[in-house]
Amino acid sequence: MQLQELVDASRRIVFFGGAGVSTESGIPDFRSEDGLYRTKYAYPPETILSADFFRLHTAEFYKFYREKMLPLWAKPNAAHIKLAEMEARGKLLAVVTQNIDGLHQAAGSKNVYELHGSIHRNHCMKCGRGYSAADIAASEGVPRCACGGTVKPDVVLYGEPLDERTVRGAVKAISEADLLIVAGTSLTVWPAAGFLDYFEGDHLVLINRDATPLDGRCELVLRRNVGEVFSEIVL
């Protein structure tokens, strides 16, 4: 069965996406040859993007964060746009994403579970006041609130737990889906990859350039770019 047929036959579709969903918007992924984790810094990106590093080396964290984690120029691609259309037509239950770029919402998606948070939400650790991604990009050094507190991005750093409400919503959506489309993810990041164990529906599809641990369980595996595949879906 091809993807178009599966989409036509399904009424409760859930999309689970990773960094590969946004590469066609110009945002590098993490683990490919030209990915973020292959770049050279004084510390490995995994170290910089940790809760301990943020606490101990906040200025160094923000230097990396502004350079590599704030692609405010990026626009939604064909995958983001088609998913928003699928939701508007009542075929898509939810998007569950490992990305923090906010491109699903920019395309018009409403029911989005951001497992790793969002660059577009930032808060003062002292008083809780919110700040935008543009505020962070325009700041210098360590961003400070009007009250003097340090501003922290609402992204899940290494060593931090996922948001419980987001987890519950994502698990519920996946467990209710009749078609789960997994795209642009290596499925090597835990606990996010474990969410797929909650799927009990009829059809499981994978769209990814490289092999993943999920390949053998899928009804359909497409080794293509995510945006190209979604641009061909007719609603």
Image (cartoon, grey):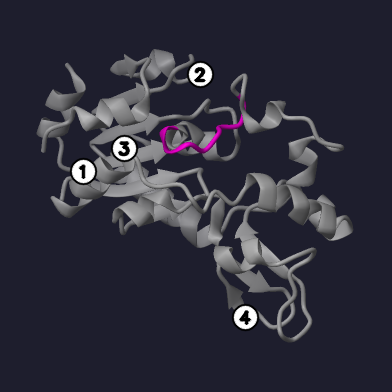
Q: Which mark is residue 12?
A: 1
Mark toward the viewer: 4 or 1: 4
Q: Is residue 121 visible to us here?
A: no
Q: Which mark is residue 213?
A: 2
Check the picture and name the quadrant holding the C terminus.
top left
Q: Which mark is residue 129?
A: 4
Range of residues picked out in magenta? 24-31
Element under label 1? Answer: loop
Quadrant of the rendered structure where residue 2 is? top left
The kind of residue tagged 1 is: Arg
Q: Separation of disc 1 and disc 3 at Cα?
A: 18 Å
Q: Which residue is mark 3?
A: 79
Task: Please say if 149 is above or below 70.
Answer: below
Mark toward the viewer: 1 or 3: 3
| SS majority, magenta | loop
Q: Are marks 4 and 3 in contact (CB under 8 Å)?
A: no
Q: Separation of disc 4 and disc 3 at Cα?
A: 33 Å
Quadrant of the rendered structure where residue 133 is? bottom right
Mark toward the start of the polypeptide (4 vs 1)? 1
